[in-house]
Structure formats: structure tokens, C-alpha cells
Amino acid sequence: MLNRLPRTAFLKRTVQSRFGIILLLITLLVAISMLTRLVFFIYSFSNVEVTLLNLAGILLFGLFYDLVNASYFIIPFVLYVWLVPQRVYSKAWHRPVLYTLFSIATFILLFNAVAEWFFWDEFNTRYNFIAVDYLVYTTEVLGNIRESYPIEWIIAGLIILCGGITYSMRTLLNQTNTVPMQFKQRSMVAIPLLALPLLFFFTVNSKYHRFSLNTYTNELAGNGMYELFAAYINNELNYEQFYKKINNEESFAEVKNLLHTPETRYISNAPFDIARQVQHTGPEKKLNVVMISVESLSADFMAAFGNKQNITPFLDSLSQHSLFFTHLYATGTRTVRGLEALSLCVPPTPGQSIVRRPRNEHLFTLGKVFGEKGYDSKFIYGGYGYFDNMGYYFSNNEYDVIDRDALKDEEIDYENIWGVADENLFTLAEREIKKTIASGKPVFTHIMTTSNHRPFTYPDGRIDIPSHTSREGAVKYTDYAIGKFIKSCATKKWFSNTIFVIVADHCASSAGKTELPINKYHIPLLIYSPANIQPQHMDRLMSQIDLGPTLLGLLNFSYTSKFYGYDIFSLEPGRERVFISTYQSLGFVRNNKLVVLLPQQKLETYQLNLTDDSMLPTAEDKALTQEAIAWYQSASYAFREGLMR
């Protein structure tokens, strides 16, 4: 019977059958996605490169990815309308079931659109690796959402809107059950619909909508749900599988040549062994070290880098009395990437930070070096250590971990879902420092702040910007808390024997018109110890992974090193380089050029102007490309093969 029906009749019959609800869902998904895309376009208009070609790409690629996403989204609904027997599907009581399923799907699409808006507002991008991480830590993320937004009102509004959409489409929904279909007929429709996502899984990825040099244009051409799925399945990337590569022996030979500096000598000739002896003359300085990694402290928050808002008055003042590094760049855009760089001193490897990966125990860390020198190494965090795997990572890599559990309720002036107020964190840190020094041992303390994070809340009455109003307020509060801490430490006997290091984990925003806007990785670094370190400006280019070796050099330590970082004071001029990355784009900066290594063995090269942060595409520099590949490939190989232990 089916074979004798004209094709148009078959299509009409299908639409009026139970599969009509699938068509309605696809149409609704595309409509909501297109509306979301339009809102993002208007909101980010000043950053989008508006040309006819880009507009066509946004619409056409956007529609394509919306349909690809729809093929995944409808899977459970296709299975339902395919497998439910006709005798059940045609019952009068089944109609409310269809309305309920359609309403649930509609609510999910609307909720996703709102969630995408908040994500875009925060990160200026579609869902990515950050969103995947957020799905893992639902307690903190949901708590953050409740504290940042009127979530109850938002959900209530979405429920009302969802009900309105379902009610307005009731006639169409009713028509989708006017033509009965037997199982064989349903299979003729369901099987191709279920085959489509399988086909797309093996043939489609995110690269197709990255057709422009303008990052905002590329992001607009994507689909948020699809990007979330893509980020999830690509959360760890094998360098040798996805990126331009050279022979592993060649990459290590190149890196061993690059890592050699006057104060080092290699311990062995083994091709994959970068262990070298760092030798300094003169006595070692067994000073206490307090390193504060500040959440999202972009360089451009400070007056020293041109800010006019007076939101870092203490740090601006302290910079005049510190060893102040003015051209330091973070390796990534997440806290765990910053912690990786500061503790392991290695280039960022593609995919997830090593802090979050399996088999990250017993690595060669800064804490290990200090431990070998007789220090107590501590990691102190204002939140719960399980978040982002920080507690596990540091406790298995020569650090004692102290988190908010160490504070009594009466010791907490304020807390939000991310952690206690920074001043309470510093009170805890001061107590832990005092405890170690009283035991007769020097201390290395790594403190991680949390206050400069949405919802930007902090105790009232500390600064002149009300809590929960802006990131600028959170920055100024953190500045206040750091100032209060250091002023308190200055009254202690151990202050003259202590070095304070203040550095960011990453910038407040990583979004720009290009995939790797270098100005979005620029962070400050202050090393303050009035009795031991002369104030000066260090203006040389420097990577976040260079902080560890530079700090150990200031202490005049001799030690065995597996770090990839340089002691900037021992490095010959002209050899400076910087690593910047997202979870899949690996950037290497040297001699005012940026090499970007991308999946599918792609490569881009740019000419940089660090004065105005401009970058222009330029011809490939073969030697620089070889160097970039060697750094990243050897680091990825070293972790995978256990050579960082």
C-alpha cells in the first residue's frame, strides 16, 4: 500500500501521522536557535566583522548546525513515536502524554537559550570546555547561578512561555495523530531519522563553521547544544593524533637545546630525559615563600597598565616597592590551567588541564622542590578542595591541602558558593604559616583566591563599591583583602624572612576577535620582600611557566629540574617565548610572531604588535613552527609517558 502512494501523499501522510510532532520539534529548535543567534549578533555587533560573506556564513552554517543538533535532540522522541503501539498511541488519554512530552522538549530548548545567553554574556562564546566542566560540578555551578541571577523568576517565566507555546500549537499537535501508522510504516521513517545522527557523528565536527578569521563570526555560526556535545567528546586531545608533529626524538632534541641555559647541565644523554642540574654559586636563601594566585586578575585592572578606575589601589602602590613583571602571559583561560603552569611549569597540553586528568600523581612540581629543601608546602583554597580536582592533585604532589573545611563558622564573615571571603582565606593562611614557622621549618604556601568570580559578592563595608554589582567591585575587594593580609604579615617577626608573590591564574575574559587574542592573556606579577628583593620593573617577555624557575633562582637554589620554564634572570636576551592556549588552540609567541597549532594538523601564523595588541596573518616561519611543535609535542608526550614524574 505504502509503495503505491505518490511521494507527496506519503509526505503529507507522515506529517499528519505521529511523526508530525518530530517535525514540530525540529521547527521549534531551529526557530529558537535562529532567534538566539540574532540576539547574540545584536549584542556583539561591534565585534563581528560584518560582510555579506560572513552574514551568509552565519545563516547557512548556523542553519546546518541547528539541523545537525536537531538530529541528536529528537532521538528519544523518535524512539517513542516509533515504538509505542498504535492501540496505545490512538487512545484519548494518550494525548496529554504528547502535550507533556512536547512541553518538556520546549522547556529544555527555552532553558538552553537562556543558559546560552548567560554563558555568552560571561565568556563571549558558545558552550565550550568550560561548560563541560560546569556540568561536572553542579553544586558550585547551580549555587553560583542562584546567587547571580533570579533563577526562580527565570524558571517561572520559562514555564509560562513554554505553556503559551504549547497552547498556541495545540491544533498542530492534534493533527499529528490523525493518520494511523503501522510498525512497518513507522520504521520507514524512524530508521532514517535515527541513522542521521550516526552519520553526523562520524562526518561533522565544529571545524566547518570556523570559516572566518573573526572569532565572533565563527561562534555565531555554531549551535550551542552541538558545541557542548562536541566539547564533551573532545575533552582530551592526543597531540600526535590531532596536531602537526615531528619525530618524537627530534622534538625532544629541539627542546633540550632550547631549555639549556648557562646555569644548567643535563644529567643524562637519554633522548627523552630533560632532567638537568641547576647550579647556583653562593649560599641558598631559605626564605618563606607566600604565593597568591588571584582569581581572574587581568593586567588591565591595574593603573600600572592604564586602568583609570582605581580598583587596585593596594597592588598599584605595592608595585612601586616590588620586583614588578610587566609582560607576563598566562598559559590558559581557566584556574586549573593557571595552577598547572604555576606548579608544574610546563606548556599547556591540548584538552583538559593536567590538574584534572587521570594519572597526575607524583609529578615534578614546585612543591616537590621546596619539599626537598626542607620546606612545608601548602595549598590553601577558600572553597572546597574537591572542586576542579584541586585537592586531589595538590595532595598527591607534595602539598598539604587546606580548604574552607579548616575554618569554623564563626571565622567566616561571608561566603558564597565558590568559597569564603578572601580576607577569611588570608586569615586561615596566616594561621597556617605561623604554625609551620613555629615548628622550625620554612614554609612555601600557595594561596588561591575566589572572590573575583561571579556573583561578585563580598562583605559589606570594606570598599566603596557595593557587593553583587560588578566585577570591578570584586577586583577592588580582593585588592583590599590582599592589602589587609600583607599589612598584617608586616607586623610579624617572620615578615623580613618572607617573599610574597602575587600573580593571576588567568585573565577575567578570554574572548576577542581572534581565537587567541594575546591581550586576553596578559597578567601581572609582583614579587615583594622589602628586606630581600630590590624594587624594579622587569619588562622582558615572560610565560607563566617561568615563574617557578625564576622564583627558585631568586632564592639561589641549586636543584634537579624537569621544568619547561626559564629563570628569566639567567636567560640570555632574545630567547624569551610565551605559551597561550584554549583547550584545543595552542599558541606560541616569539620574536613578535604567534604560531597557532590547531586540530586537523592546521597551522596559522600572525605578526604581533604587543604595543597595541594587533595581529595580522603572515607567512609561515618554518623555524618558529618547528620550535612551537617541539615544545607542545614533547610536553604532551612527557605527561602521557610518565616522564613528568
Image (cartoon, grey):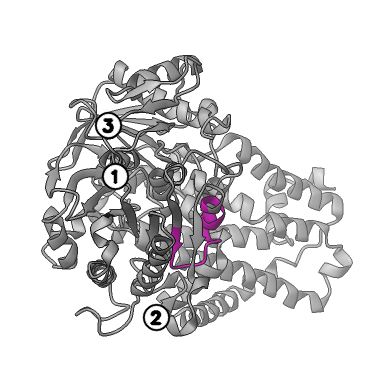
In this rendered view, identify the residue nearer to me: 264 or 405. 264
Q: CA distance from mark 2 to mark 1?
A: 38 Å
Magenta range: 379-394
Amino acid type at mark 3: Arg
Q: Position of residue 464 (x, y in %)?
A: 19, 80
Q: Position of residue 596 (x, y in %)?
A: 35, 31
Residue picked out by circle 2 = 414
Cβ atoms under marks 2 and 1 closer than 8 Å: no
Amino acid type at mark 2: Tyr
Q: Is residue 392 magenta?
A: yes
In this rendered view, identify the residue nearer to me: 357 or 209. 357
At a point 43% along the width and 68% down the height, the residue shown is 382
Left or right: residue 521 compared with residue 169 = left
Disc 2 or 1, which lies upstream in sequence?
A: 1
Residue picked out by circle 3 = 577
At a point 51% along the width and 68% down the height, the residue shown is 140
- Asked whether residue 641 is in view, the answer is yes
* Numbered disc 1: secondary structure: loop
Residue picked out by circle 1 = 285
Amino acid type at mark 1: Lys
